[in-house]
Every structure is written in C-alpha cells, then in structure tokens.
Image (tube, grey):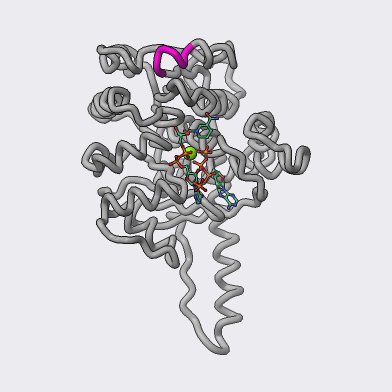
C-alpha cells in the first residue's frame, strides 16, 4: 500500500462530509508516514554494529564566503545518526569548518585541479552525498562539482542537491535528469529558478502542489522537495505534504539542517528496502521524515529561545525531536 495525497473534489452539501473524510484520510496517511519513517530507522540494540554502518555521508560545499552551511549539514547528519561525515570544500574554508567541530572530516580539495579524482577516492565508501550547502557560484568549483555528480551517478550513490547545487542544476538540468536516486530540496526562489530553466514558463504560484509534481516529471521523475509554509514532496507520481508545526522564525541554515538530515535518511530508506516502506518510494519517505524532523527542531528551539533562535539551537534539538517523532 502506497501513501497518497488526497485531493478534495466536492461541492455544496457534501462538502462538510467530504472534508471530514479528507481529514480522516489525511490523518491516516500521516500515521502511515510516521510508521514508515520508524520502519527505516536502524535499531541501536545490536552489539554487532561497526563504525560507518549507519551512514558515511559526504557534503560537497564550503567556500570562502560560506562555511556555516556545510558545517550545519554535516553536523546534522551526525546528530540524526550517521557515523561519519566527510566535508569536501574549497581550501580556504577547510580550517574554518574544522574549527567548528572535531567531528567532521574535512577535505580541502574542491578548488584543486584534481578535485574530481580526490573526491572519487572516497566515493566508494560513501552511502550518500549532499551537494551544494555553502558551495558558492564560482565557475571553477561548479565545474568540479559537475564532474563529481557524474561520478556519483555512475556509482549509483544517492544524492541530495541543495542551495548552489541547485544553481548548477538550473544551468544544466541534463546533469541530473532521470537519475532515480536524486533528491532536490529547493526553497521558494530556487524552485522558481529551476522551473523557469526546465519548463521555460512562469510557474503558477496558486498551485504549488501541481507545480512540484510537474517539475519532478519534467526532470524525469526525480524527487523534488519544495520547502515553504508546507513542504511539498513529489516524485512525479504522488505529492506528499509535510505541515508539521514549526515556527515563524526563519533564520538562515534551516535548509542545511534539512539537507544533511536527508542525506542520512535516504541511505537508511534505501537500505531498508521496499518492504519496510510498504511499497512507497523510499526517497519520498526519507524526504518526509527529514522535513518533519527539521520543522520539529524549529518548533522546539523556538519554544525555548523565541526570537533569538538560531540554527545551532535547532541542531541541539535534533536528538529529542527525533525521539519524540520517530522512536516508539
Ligand atoms: N551560515 C551560512 O553559511 C549559510 C549559508 N548559506 C548559503 O548561502 C548560499 C546562498 O543561498 P541562499 O539561500 O541565500 O540563496 P540565494 O539564491 O542567494 O537567495 C537569497 C535571496 O533569496 C530570497 N529568498 C530566499 N528564500 C526566500 C523565500 N522563501 N521567499 C522569498 N524570497 C526568498 C531572499 O531575497 P530578499 O528577500 O533579500 O530579496 C534572499 O536574500 C548557499 O551556498 C547557501 O548554502 C545558507 O545555507 C544560509 C546559511
Ligand atoms: N513559511 C514557513 N513556515 C514554516 N516552516 C517553513 C517556512 N518556510 C520554510 N520552512 C521550513 O524551514 C526549513 C528550511 O526551509 P527554507 O525555505 O528556510 O530553506 P532555505 O532557504 O534553503 O534555508 P537556508 O537558510 O539553510 O538556505 C524547511 O524544513 C521548511 O519546512
Ligand atoms: Mg538553502
């Protein structure tokens, strides 16, 4: 049984009944989704686990201007439950990122002439790649990332593309078209940019669900997560909605928390296999889980810190938010 997004088609006197039916369906779908995410989370009960098994995640990003974003993505992946995180960044960003945390493994290779080969050395050991947080838009870096993406696809490794990685995809959609293990996580501006690049027309902002579905289809049914007041997640066949309560605090970096979390969850979902996701797309389940978690971190942090909430405060909440949502 797959999870659906229920559409309402009703008018006049039947509207009320249809709405309660819709609410009942929506609640059931939501319960199903929570259960599917719980199904993919690896148990921590076995004593036979070895380091790396629950996730070796690569983050491709970090340049002179942006060092926070790859840090947020990398540390979020670890806090969600990955065992190791490798950050591949530009040379001058590396000491800065290392200084934020001893837990990240940092490779200062992204602006070198052999960047692709340097990352390729690690690719066979990585379970998923998150491409874009704090990458910037320098042509040299983007060209290297193009090569890294080609190599990632050739090895069938799942890839989450965010931020400036989406800028690159908007320049060259063929790079990712039809790659069934790709998930794009655009914010509102990034979504519009992708839409215009791929569909060559202005998007209909009155139908965000339909737009998410269409963009996914136009990109060869890859998974698209349009972030916003509600997160809309589609693989071109169905649309899931995540409207977990968050807050009005919109500090920068929340998208990085989401993309890092998703890097781990996509690995877990693919490893769990279709039985655990009950026939639903593992990528959709992972994306819904990561969106729900990010919004819950935002809600919990906001309850404590209100206006002064920052992404660091949200990351502190990952453990309790995760337990509250996904630990039975
Ligand atoms: N601490 C760090 O290191 C962080 C680094 N980061 C890194 O920064 C890089 C650039 O990423 P980015 O998201 O700032 O992209 P970009 O296309 O320049 O858009 C900026 C402009 O778009 C607009 N806008 C945005 N959202 C909107 C919305 N929902 N609805 C409407 N408008 C919206 C808004 O425009 P304004 O309101 O100012 O006119 C905004 O100023 C990338 O590498 C990323 O990873 C971040 O991860 C944060 C933490
Ligand atoms: N209006 C909103 N109301 C509630 N939650 C929101 C809203 N807009 C975004 N979010 C949530 O914030 C998280 C990050 O989305 P956002 O649009 O801020 O990403 P972003 O712009 O890429 O962030 P970043 O600053 O990291 O680049 C998502 O989980 C999304 O659900
Ligand atoms: Mg972003």
Q: Please report the bounds of the magenta region as a residue range.
A: 89-94
Q: Is residue 232 above or below residue 254?
A: below
- 4 is within the stretch colored magenta: no
Residue sitting nearer the eye, 172 or 130: 172
Residue sitting nearer the eye, 254 or 64: 64
Q: Which residue is drawn at 61% across and 40% down?
A: 251
159 displayed left or right of 146: right
**Horizontal and vertical percent position of residue 234:** 40, 52
Q: Which residue is drawn at 26% across and 56% down?
A: 199
Residue sitting nearer the eye, 141 or 60: 141
Q: Is residue 139 visible?
A: yes
What secondary structure is the stretch in magenta mostly built from?
helix
**Horizontal and vertical percent position of residue 33:** 53, 50
Q: Which residue is drawn at 35% across and 49% down?
A: 193
- 90 is within the stretch colored magenta: yes
> How many numbered circles does the render carry?
0
Q: Can residue 155 be seen in this view?
A: no
Q: Residue furthest right?
A: 304
**Horizontal and vertical percent position of residue 104:** 52, 15
Q: Is residue 252 above or below residue 217?
A: above
On-image quarter of the C terminus: top right
Residue sitting nearer the eye, 144 or 11: 144
**Horizontal and vertical percent position of residue 1:** 43, 55
The quadrant holding residue 253 is top right
Q: Which residue is drawn at 45% across and 19% down?
A: 87
The quadrant holding residue 178 is top left
The quadrant holding residue 176 is top left
Q: Residue furthest bottom?
A: 13
Q: In this view, does 215 lie above or below 57?
A: below
């Amino acid at each position: 049984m797959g999870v659906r997004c229920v559409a309402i088609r009703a008018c006049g006197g039947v509207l009320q009944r249809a709405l309660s039916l819709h609410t009942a369906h929506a609640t059931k779908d939501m319960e199903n989704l929570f259960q599917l995410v719980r199904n993919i989370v690896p148990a921590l009960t076995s004593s036979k686990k070895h380091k790396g098994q629950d996730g070796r995640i690569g983050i491709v990003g970090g340049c002179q201007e942006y060092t926070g974003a790859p840090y947020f993505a990398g540390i979020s992946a670890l806090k969600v439950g990955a065992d190791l995180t490798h950050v591949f960044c530009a040379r001058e960003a590396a000491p800065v990122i290392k200084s934020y945390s001893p837990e990240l493994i940092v490779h200062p290779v992204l602006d070198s002439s052999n960047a692709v080969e340097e990352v390729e050395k690690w690719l066979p050991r990585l379970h998923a790649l998150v491409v874009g947080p704090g990458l910037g838009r320098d042509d040299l870096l983007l060209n290297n990332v193009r090569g890294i993406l080609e190599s990632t696809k050739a090895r069938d490794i799942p890839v989450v593309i965010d931020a400036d990685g989406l800028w690159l995809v908007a320049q060259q959609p063929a790079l990712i078209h039809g790659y069934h293990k790709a998930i794009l996580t655009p914010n509102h501006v990034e979504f519009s940019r992708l839409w215009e690049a791929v569909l060559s027309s202005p998007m209909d902002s009155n139908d965000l669900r339909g737009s998410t579905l269409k963009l996914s289809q136009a990109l060869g049914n890859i998974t698209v997560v349009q972030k916003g007041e509600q997160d809309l997640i589609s693989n071109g066949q169905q649309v899931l909605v995540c409207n977990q309560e968050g807050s009005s605090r919109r500090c920068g970096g929340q998208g990085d928390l989401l993309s890092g979390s998703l890097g781990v969850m996509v690995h877990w979902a693919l490893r769990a296999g279709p039985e655990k996701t009950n026939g639903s797309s593992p990528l959709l389940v992972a994306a819904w889980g990561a969106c729900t978690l990010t919004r819950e971190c935002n809600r919990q942090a906001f309850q404590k810190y209100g206006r002064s909430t920052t992404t660091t405060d949200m990351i502190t909440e990952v453990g309790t938010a995760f337990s509250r949502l996904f630990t039975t």
